[in-house]
Amino acid sequence: MKRYAFLIVGSGLYGATFAHLSKQAGKRVLVIDKRPHLGGNIYCENIEGINVHKYGAHIFHTNNKEVWDFVNTFVDFNRYTNSPIANFKGKLFNLPFNMNTFHQMWNINTPEEAQHIIEQQRNEIRRCLSNEGIAAPRNLEEQALMLVGTDIYETLIKGYTEKQWGRKCTELPTFIIKRLPVRFVFDNNYFNDRYQGIPIGGYNKLIEGLLAGVEAITNADFFDNRSHWESLADKIIYTGQIDEFFNYQLGHLEYRSVRFEQESLNIPNYQGNAVVNYTDAGVAYTRIIEHKHFEMFGEDIVKCPRTVISKEYSNEWHNGIEPYYPINDERNNRLLEEYKTIAKQRPDVIFGGRLAEYKYYDMAPTIEKAMSTFRTLSK
Ligand code: UDP
């Protein structure tokens, strides 16, 4: 028997959820994190009374009542509803693609008119594809064109997606764009999920709740002394990059990273919305986040005289910067499978979360996965 049942490498949502469940089940668990703080990418820094999402905007949404009830045991959630705005060459559009967007795009007023235009554009694409003998969309461009037609694709998808992923839409997998709803109602809610919000007082409260009473060490890099850390526990819950765990022996998986240019401004309200996407390829950043709008509504916005914004610049990951998005194209998925094969030789290690599973997880599915893995292990 070792000192701990579980060593959890990484204190993001996956690690923190797993730690909480283990502790509740009476297991001894140790969490280590290489950063100077806990919480992984949902960590917030309070700047001038505003919770700033230091590692990118996080909006909690789920259809899963169990997950919603679970997070609400640690912190109450506010009524924030994500309704991003897209800015294309100075013209504003509502997202996700809905009747407001179609009105702004084509000056039409009814679902029938919008459906007619999109259907015409889709038919044109279908005809081109079937002339080439293609039955199903093979890449993100074809998928997007089939979903919303040429105008929306050119204005709101192509530039943004190519900036975010640093690859042509014709080289990207289709599933990325399937995340976005298309609706023929006037509804700017970005998500279809029943439950949505931001923790009142910020995400740190959620992490503090999950890790209450759990032994956790910050500034502790697993790779600085892996034999020491590995010797401490019966099982390791590893939430870092899977390729790094195996010392990149099969090659590097590719990730997209984000650089945040943060500014504190002496005005109460910069852009009137938490999220504004810049969908034109000519603007270097992908979006601007104005953090106070996640947690301040109505008069509270002006009562707080300053504001903090972050411009997001997307770039390719290299050693020394943070990896954010796995790039699940064919090459990387093949390499991932090879890593998963060698991971089977380490039954004492569980690989969980966005980086270790190399999967584009949102927050709620991350929690679900940690819960289900914990349950399977406990059986
Ligand atoms: N997307 C787009 N235009 C937008 C917003 C999103 O084309 O204005 C596409 C883009 O390909 C992106 C994907 O939709 O990668 C998913 O976007 P989402 O905002 O859900 O991603 P995240 O918030 O995780 O970065």
Image (spheres, rainbow, N blue to C red):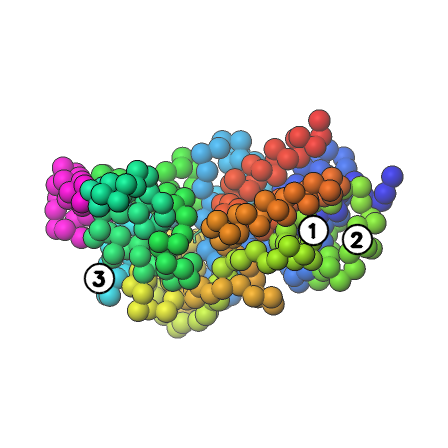
Q: Is residue 179 toward the left or the right of residue 132 in the image?
A: right
Per the image, the residue denoted by label 2 is: 229
Name the secondary structure under disc 2.
helix
Where residue 181 sits in the image (x, y, percent)? Answer: 32, 42
What's the mark number on residue 21?
A: none
Q: Is residue 296 toward the left or the right of residue 31 in the image?
A: left
Per the image, the residue denoted by label 1 is: 9
Q: Which residues are magenta?
A: 100-125
Q: Amino acid at mark 3?
A: Lys
Which one is closest to the eye, mark 2 or mark 3?
2
Q: Residue furthest top?
A: 379
- Say if 279 sits above or below 130 in the image: below
Q: Say which of 99 and 248 sits in front.
A: 248
Q: Earlier in the sequence, mark 2 or mark 1?
A: 1
Tag 2 near tag 1, CB within 8 Å: yes
Where residue 81 sits in the image (x, y, percent)? Answer: 37, 46
Q: Is residue 233 magenta?
A: no
Q: Identify the residue at horizontal 24%, vertical 40% (top origin).
A: 130
Q: Amino acid at mark 2?
A: Trp
Name the secondary structure under disc 1.
strand
Q: Earlier in the sequence, mark 1 or mark 3?
A: 1
Badge 2: few (under 14), some or many (20 or more) residues near its Cα, within 10 Å? some
Where residue 195 sits in the image (x, y, percent)? Answer: 43, 37
Name the secondary structure under disc 3.
strand
The reply to whether residue 43 is visible in this rendering is no
Q: Name the main secondary structure of what is drawn in magenta.
A: helix
The reply to whether residue 136 is visible in this rendering is yes
Per the image, the residue denoted by label 3 is: 91
Q: CA distance from mark 2 to mark 1?
A: 9 Å
